[in-house]
């Protein structure tokens, strides 16, 4: 998937006034790539675009993003863009997201991410999960599109799966990703929230589309359950931070009750909807477990190991 991501970047159209450097941040206990191997990702497709590789001998997603941020600042670049290593972009992605940022005066600019299955799901359960996930993503993109057209693009949370950041913005000159989220994720939502608190302007680039590859191992009940639990635990732990224990317990109990009721409702509608609510039931049950987990300390999260693929 990483090779596909880099090759899609290698095929980008580059505006005449722009110089691009591609950076791969590898964070693991031992390096997988060397310089020659990284440069080989480009093949013979590009000779007007630099590619570089940074290795950090530690697991942690916020740490990896900070490595890219520090690299770009030290090299005195004007913009830093992120896509995930399981994504690809089309030829016009960079032109479109950069144009939206420049025209809108945005410090943070985001765009749509559309899911693409790595293979056609064959098992019934996999098909139900894929269908539910795809519908969820479609609803999110529709809401973001409506907000953007209504002039409310600043209300769309900008996360790093399709992301452009103005490195020269005075409001965010020293901002970094918080390493408390190294193993759990949520570092990009936290970054967005703090940037907005500092007065950073954000916006949406609806035509700058990235495509997320969904491998088979993510189309399982266990993965989606754990993912929802992890996301809700992180979100609710942040929301209730600084509150007294009784207040936290009350908020968490209410949230857990709502998610449990939603899970039971989705489960009850399985037969009438011919399984369309299966994905929602799995996610809401996971969310309820995550709500309860937010009372305790963070455990090993989704980013505590490197996934190959």
Image (spheres, helix red, strand yellow):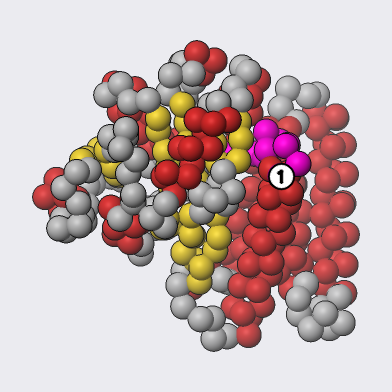
- Identify which residue, 142 or 117, lies in the foreground: 142
Can the viewer see residue 200 in this picture? yes
* Residue at screen point 87% across, 51% down: 257
Q: Whole-percent x and y of residue 131? A: 65, 73
232 inside magenta stretch: no
Which of 304/208 is in front? 208
Position of residue 276 relative to residue 183, above or below, is below
Span highlighted in magenta in the image: 149-158
The residue located at (61%, 17%) in the rendering is 198
Residue extending furthest front?
Answer: 16
**Nearer to the camera, 27 or 175:** 175
| Res. 298 image quadrant | top right
Image quadrant in which the N terminus is located: bottom left
Badge 1 is on which residue? 149
Work out which quarter of the rendered image holds the C terminus and state it: bottom left
Neighbourhood count class around disc 1 (C-alpha, 10 Å): few under 14, some 14–19, many 20 upward: few
Image vertical order of residue 261 relative to residue 249, above or below: below
Query: Of helix, strand and loop, which one carries label 1?
Result: helix
Report the predominant secondary structure element of the magenta stretch. Answer: loop
Look at 69% across and 43% down and name the residue there: 148
Q: Is residue 257 left or right of residue 58?
A: right
Expressed as whole percent of the image width and height from the top left, the position of residue 2 reads 33, 57
Q: Residue at x 71, y 27 (%)?
A: 241
């Amino acid at each position: 998937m990483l090779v596909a991501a880099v090759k899609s970047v290698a095929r980008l159209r580059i505006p005449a006034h722009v110089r691009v450097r591609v950076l791969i941040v590898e964070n693991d206990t031992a390096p997988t790539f060397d310089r020659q191997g990284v440069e080989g990702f480009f093949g013979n497709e590009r000779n007007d675009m630099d590619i570089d590789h940074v290795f950090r001998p530690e697991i942690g997603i916020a740490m990896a993003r900070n490595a890219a941020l520090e690299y770009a600042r030290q090299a005195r670049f004007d913009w830093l863009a992120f896509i995930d290593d399981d994504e690809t972009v089309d030829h016009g992605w960079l032109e479109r997201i950069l144009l939206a940022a420049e025209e809108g005066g945005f410090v943070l600019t985001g765009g749509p991410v559309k899911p693409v299955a790595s293979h056609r799901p064959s098992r019934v359960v996999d098909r139900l999960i894929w269908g539910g996930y795809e519908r969820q993503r479609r609803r999110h993109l529709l809401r973001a599109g409506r907000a953007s057209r209504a002039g409310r693009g600043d209300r769309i949370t900008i996360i790093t799966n399709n992301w452009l950041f103005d490195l020269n913005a005075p409001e965010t000159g020293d901002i970094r990703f918080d390493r408390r989220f190294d193993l759990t994720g949520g570092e990009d939502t936290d970054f967005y929230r703090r940037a907005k608190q500092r007065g950073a302007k954000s916006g949406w680039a609806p035509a700058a589309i990235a495509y997320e590859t969904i491998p088979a191992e993510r189309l399982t009940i266990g993965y989606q359950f754990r993912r929802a639990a992890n996301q809700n635990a992180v979100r609710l732990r942040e929301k209730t931070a600084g509150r007294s224990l009784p207040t936290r317990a009350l908020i968490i109990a209410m949230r857990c009750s709502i998610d449990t009721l939603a899970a039971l409702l989705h489960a009850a509608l399985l037969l009438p909807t011919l399984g369309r609510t299966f994905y929602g039931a799995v996610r809401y049950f996971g969310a309820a477990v995550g709500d309860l987990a937010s009372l305790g300390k963070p455990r090993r999260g989704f980013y505590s190991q490197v996934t190959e693929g």
